Image (tube, rainbow, N blue to C red):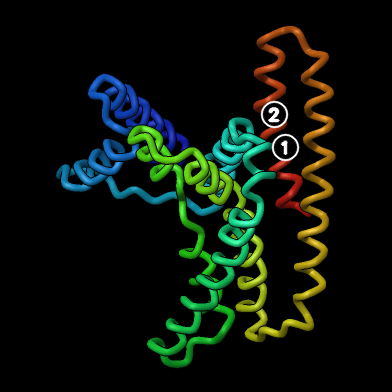
Amino acid sequence: MSSIELVLGLLVAVTALALLAGRLSVPYPILLVLGGLGLGFVPGLPPVSLAPDVVFLVFLPPLLQAAGWYTSVQDLKTNRRPIALLSVGLVLFSTFAVAAVAQAVIPGLGWGPALVLGAIVSPTDAVAATAIMERLGAPHRLVAILEGESLLNDASALLIYRIAVGAAALHHFAWSKFAPSIVLALAGSVVAGYLAARIWTWVTGHVRDVPTAIILQFVTTFAVWIFAETV
């Protein structure tokens, strides 16, 4: 089964489960988890294997774009301190904690591969938690903090992951070598993101044709991601 067929099949399954969750009045993440577990026990299904590049390119950009579109800017400003601590501080702490434990239990594991492992598992996905808490009537501030954290923690983890992969390839990790890259990536991401958002807002504000606006939004979402990956 090709990657395209596999992705389309997964999207169909997710859509069907999401529609069923709406009819049953059940938070859709719960039904998606149960559906995934059920598919794992179906005999005769082909093994599911997706390249990381496919996941990053196909799934992550629209998810982040949708999260950014629906996230309240006012909530981000109001809760900027806890969101920053969770999306940056907690991701860094979790990455190095996992790396330290991995080095302790896996003999001969260097800091590079250990940090790669830590960066992979450190960012939490709060989408399921927020969907369930909104249904249960959790406090708005708590939901806003989790939504803001889930929007930004992927950026922190991906930056750490790329640096860790470079360190693993060089078999050497030195802060003096990677610190300038970290600062440049952080500053460049903020500037590029702000400029891209301003340009996209200005362009879409002058488009009145709905099909053109949809195509423009689709192309822009992936174009910005590809540009960021290239830089």
Is 45 displayed left or right of 133 in the figure? left
| Residue 33, picture quadrant | top left
- Where does residue 198 sit, x and y in percent of width and height? 83, 33
Relative image position of residue 217 (x, y in whole percent): 68, 25
User: Quadrant of the rendered structure where residue 163 is?
Assistant: bottom right
SS label for mark 1 = helix
Q: Position of residue 53 (x, y in %)?
A: 56, 51
Of 205 and 106, which appears nearest the observer? 205
Residue 124 x/y as whole percent: 47, 56
Q: Amino acid at mark 2?
A: Val
Instruction: Identify residue for label 1.
Output: 223
Q: Quadrant of the C terminus?
A: bottom right
Q: Residue furthest bottom?
A: 107
Q: Label 2: how many residues lie within 10 Å, few (<14), some (14-19) or many (20+)?
A: few
- State the residue position of label 2: 219
Closest to the observer, 81 or 113:
81
- Count residues near mark 1 (Cα–Cα under 10 Å), then give few for <14, some for 14-19, many for 20+: few
Q: Residue at x 68, y 37 (%)?
A: 73
User: What residue appears at the point 80 percent right and 66 percent down from the top-left corner?
Assistant: 183
Q: Is residue 177 above or below residue 5?
A: below
Q: Residue at x 77, y 20 (%)?
A: 204
Q: Is residue 204 above or below residue 149?
A: above
Q: Say which mark, if any, is on residue 185.
A: none
Viewer-proximal residue, 138 or 203? 138
Q: Image height check: is 47 above or below 173? A: above
Query: Is there a contact, CB below 8 Å, between mark 1 and mark 2?
Result: yes
Amino acid, disc 1: Ala
Q: Which residue is at the far top?
A: 209
6 sits left or right of 47 in the view: right
18 relative position to 177: left or right: left
